[in-house]
Image: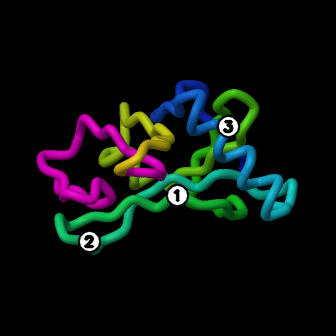
């Protein structure tokens, strides 16, 4: 069963897309894998973000952002709808940042949130 959604539930900045493509090339990610975006229980605020490369499962919706295949479990959309993922490369902070309008609070490290 193919499940592809036309509207992107999340967005990626140019910096994030560039970094993700670099990671894909460096780690030789298989062509049948895509970017998995999701949440899991844990972290100092209740939920932690999931960001990595994985194969699609039956629970996933699939969409495309600037040529990148993106997978997200259908049940995670309520926590992630409208979120922007950026790549930050500064003196004090380096890594992916998550701007999530659904988060009622976030922790200081920016990788966990409560909804």
- Which residue position is annotated with label 1? 51
Q: Which residues are magenta?
A: 93-115
Name the residue rendered at 27%, 64% in the picture.
47
Mark nearest the camera among 3 and 2 is 3
Q: Which mark is residue 104?
A: none
Residue extending furthest toward the left: 104
Name the residue rendered at 51%, 52% in the picture.
37
* Residue placed most toward the observer, 63 or 45: 45
Answer with mark 3 or mark 2, whichever residue precedes in sequence: 3
- Which residue position is annotated with label 2? 43
Q: Which mark is residue 18?
A: 3
Answer with mark 1 or mark 2, whichever residue precedes in sequence: 2
Q: Is residue 16 above or below residue 76?
A: above
* Residue placed most toward the observer, 9 or 99: 99
Can you give x and y, in whole percent of width and height, for residue 6 in the image?
60, 26
Can you give x and y, in whole percent of width and height, for residue 25 in the image?
82, 53
31 lies left or right of 78: right
The residues tagged by marks 1 and 2 sit, at their Cα atoms, a distance apart of 14 Å
Can you give x and y, in whole percent of width and height, for residue 44 in the image?
19, 70
């Amino acid at each position: 069963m193919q499940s592809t959604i036309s509207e992107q539930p999340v967005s990626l900045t140019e910096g994030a897309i560039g970094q993700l493509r670099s990671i894909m090339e460096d780690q030789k990610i298989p062509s049948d894998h895509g970017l998995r975006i999701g949440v899991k229980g844990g972290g100092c605020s209740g939920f932690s973000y999931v960001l990595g490369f994985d194969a699609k499962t039956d629970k996933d919706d699939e969409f495309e952002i600037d040529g990148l295949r993106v997978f997200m479990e259908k049940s995670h959309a309520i926590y992630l709808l409208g979120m922007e993922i950026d790549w930050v490369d500064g003196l004090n902070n380096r890594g992916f940042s998550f701007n999530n309008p659904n988060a009622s609070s976030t922790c200081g490290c920016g990788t966990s949130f409560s909804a």
